[in-house]
Image: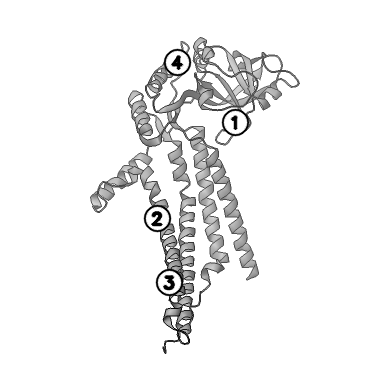
């Protein structure tokens, strides 16, 4: 019996640890709107990526009232990078960024400078490295101003950022160059992400999705705040279950306390007049009513918490809830959205998916631990006092 309880406790601890890690991953993911496109194929003449970038910036400029910051970046994984003088090399995830990228996405600059709007306009061959890459390529030296070879092209190191390995990246190291320079050098990239921070989620996500998908079909749109809410549903379920159990336990104990007071007054009526007990009875009754009102308010807030996702995921709600055809139509519409054959993803979407998996496995482990170990304070029966009904 003791080993069983110990195993349940370990499962509870494992579940709590997994859910804490999943919650940390979700909290670290920024709330942004993203439209991820497959990048155009690079050619010797170039110009395709620049044209896509300029068109995307025009579309984002149309939504300045709804976006506090916006940017465009192309990504390529597994890119070889080497110091021009020497044999040191590194494999990085390369981001080809446009103007204003570092206003929308924060990077801690250690030395030098970041990619500027002027670099993008002039297609400067400048690159920003993370600190581990700079130390490997130029050990004991100042990396700023040094030259590196990137897919056969020479770039000058303009700055060094903190960097480090990140969740959602296949490579441990990252680097940044102007998106126009990547196009001019015909560097192959995999995806292009148009992203922005919304002033308000209401209307902004729909406008950005419709505008960009009409301009350039074939991409995948994501509201990261919406994805994070969907990924955190296991925690919401756990909070709902725990809240319901706590409310039931409190109601059971309140009923026992009220019943006990009734029994006490019934016993007191054997030796005292009712008019003498009336003030105390009224005071106790008012306190009991306040306690029941507090429980009712808590139940209302719990119900509001339960239906809150329906206000965000409006696509879940059928047009007519009581019609079977409306329910089945909504089900197949959601199925069609999730059955897209090809889906482009960003690093942030991968982070949300990881957080979702950690939360689900953590919740499963926690529930198994509760089933094995049990929750004694919920199973304890509250005895109701006996009342002498002779009077």
What colouring style does the render use? one colour
User: Does dot 2 land on a helix, a strand or a loop?
Assistant: helix
* Sooner in the amino-acid sequence: mark 4 or mark 3: 4
Q: Are marks 3 and 1 in contact (CB under 8 Å)?
A: no
Q: Is residue 338 above or below residue 289?
A: above
| Left or right: 126, with 383 as reference point | right
Q: Which residue lies under the disc numbered 4?
A: 50
Image location of residue 320, percent across then percent down:
24, 49
Question: The N terminus is located in which quarter?
Answer: bottom right
Would you name the residue on which mark 2 appears?
303
Q: Which residue is mark 1?
A: 171
Label 4 neighbourhood size at 10 Å, few (<14), some (14-19), many (20+)? many
Residue 282 is marked as 3
**Relative side of 332 to 144, left or right:** left
Asked if residue 182 lies left or right of residue 164, the reply is left
Q: Earlier in the sequence, mark 3 or mark 1?
A: 1
């Amino acid at each position: 019996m003791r080993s069983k309880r110990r195993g349940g406790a370990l499962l509870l601890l494992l579940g709590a640890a997994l859910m804490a890690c999943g919650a940390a991953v979700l909290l670290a993911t920024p709330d942004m709107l993203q439209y991820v496109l497959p990048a155009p194929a690079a050619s010797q003449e170039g110009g395709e990526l620049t044209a896509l970038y300029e068109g995307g910036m025009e579309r984002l400029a149309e939504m300045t009232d709804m976006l506090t910051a916006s940017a465009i970046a192309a990504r390529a994984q597994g890119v070889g990078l080497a110091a021009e003088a020497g044999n040191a090399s590194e494999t990085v995830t390369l981001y080809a960024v446009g103007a204003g990228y570092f206003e929308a996405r924060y990077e801690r600059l250690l030395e030098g400078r970041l990619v500027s709007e002027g670099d993008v306009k002039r297609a400067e061959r400048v690159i920003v490295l993370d600190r581990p890459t700079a130390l490997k390529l130029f050990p004991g030296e100042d990396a700023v101003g040094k030259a590196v070879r990137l897919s056969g092209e020479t770039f000058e190191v303009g700055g060094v950022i903190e960097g480090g390995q990140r969740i959602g990246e296949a490579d441990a190291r990252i680097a940044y160059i102007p998106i126009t320079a990547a196009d001019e050098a015909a560097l192959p990239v995999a995806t292009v992400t148009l992203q922005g921070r919304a002033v308000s989620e209401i209307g902004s996500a729909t406008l950005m999705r419709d505008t960009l998908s009409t301009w350039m079909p074939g991409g995948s749109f994501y509201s990261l705040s919406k994805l994070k809410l969907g990924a955190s549903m296991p925690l919401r379920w756990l909070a709902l279950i725990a809240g319901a159990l706590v409310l039931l336990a409190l109601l059971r104990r309140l009923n026992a306390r009220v019943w006990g007071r009734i029994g006490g007054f019934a016993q007191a009526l054997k030796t005292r007049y009712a008019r003498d007990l009336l003030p105390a009875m009224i005071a106790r009754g008012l306190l009991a009513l306040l306690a029941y009102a507090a429980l009712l308010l808590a139940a209302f807030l719990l119900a509001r918490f339960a239906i809150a996702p329906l206000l965000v995921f409006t696509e879940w709600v059928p047009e007519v809830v009581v019609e079977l055809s409306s329910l089945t139509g909504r089900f197949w519409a959601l199925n069609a959205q999730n059955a897209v054959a090809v889906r482009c993803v960003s690093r942030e979407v991968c982070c949300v998916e990881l957080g979702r998996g950690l939360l689900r496995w953590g919740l499963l482990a926690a529930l198994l631990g509760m089933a094995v170990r049990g929750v004694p304070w919920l199973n304890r029966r509250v005895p109701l006092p006996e009342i002498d009904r002779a009077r």
